[in-house]
Image (cartoon, rainbow, N blue to C red):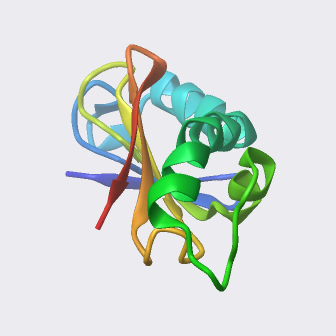
Amino acid sequence: MDIELEVQGLAVKVLDGAYTADNAITGEGIEFATSIVDDLDAYKTTAADQLVSLYNEVWLDDKIGELSATQIASLLINPKVVIYDVEGAACIYFNDSDMFAGHYVEISIDQFQVNGIGIVG
């Protein structure tokens, strides 16, 4: 059974597994969720650094214009956090403010580190 947790006003979904026991989130799960939410700005910066050339070279929208990494980071909004059933694994989904045609920017976390950044529909 998946469980929703609110951390600093942000809903975090915790999938049944490493961070749940007896239909509740474990202390480690709460710590992991809190650490992700605490570091959202750093995750946005990391994603923006990796996406700036992709946006400017492939997805450039004439209405928006060319963007810097700082501008891209500021346009990543409304994060959704999903903590997976394996220890240290999660995804953060940001609304793209239409930079990437309304797709989400996904940051994959594995073994407590960023594992990948992508554009998902």
Height in image: 29 above or below 23?
A: above
Query: Is residue 5 at all visible to an observer of this figure?
Result: no
Residue appearing at x 64%, y 36% in the figure: 49
Residue appearing at x 29%, y 31% in the figure: 21
Give how far across and how far down residue 112 sits, in percent: 47, 17
Residue appearing at x 62%, y 81% in the figure: 62
Q: Nearer the viewer, residue 65 or 76?
A: 65
Height in image: 93 above or below 69?
A: below
Is residue 30 found left or right of 38 in the rendered image? left
Height in image: 46 above or below 119?
A: above
Residue appearing at x 25%, y 24% in the figure: 86
Give how far across and how far down residue 98 sits, in percent: 54, 77
Is residue 20 found left or right of 42 in the rendered image? left
Query: Is residue 70 at all visible to an observer of this figure?
Result: yes
Query: Looking at the image, which residue sits at the far bottom?
Result: 63
Q: Nearer the viewer, residue 107 or 89?
A: 107
Q: Nearer the viewer, residue 107 or 67?
A: 67
Q: Nearer the viewer, residue 12 or 100?
A: 100
The quadrant of the image that shows the C terminus is bottom left
Give how far across and how far down residue 4 sits, in percent: 42, 57
**Residue 14 occupies quadrant:** top left
Counting the numbered discs, the total is 0
Height in image: 25 above or below 76?
A: above
Is residue 114 found left or right of 120 in the rendered image? right
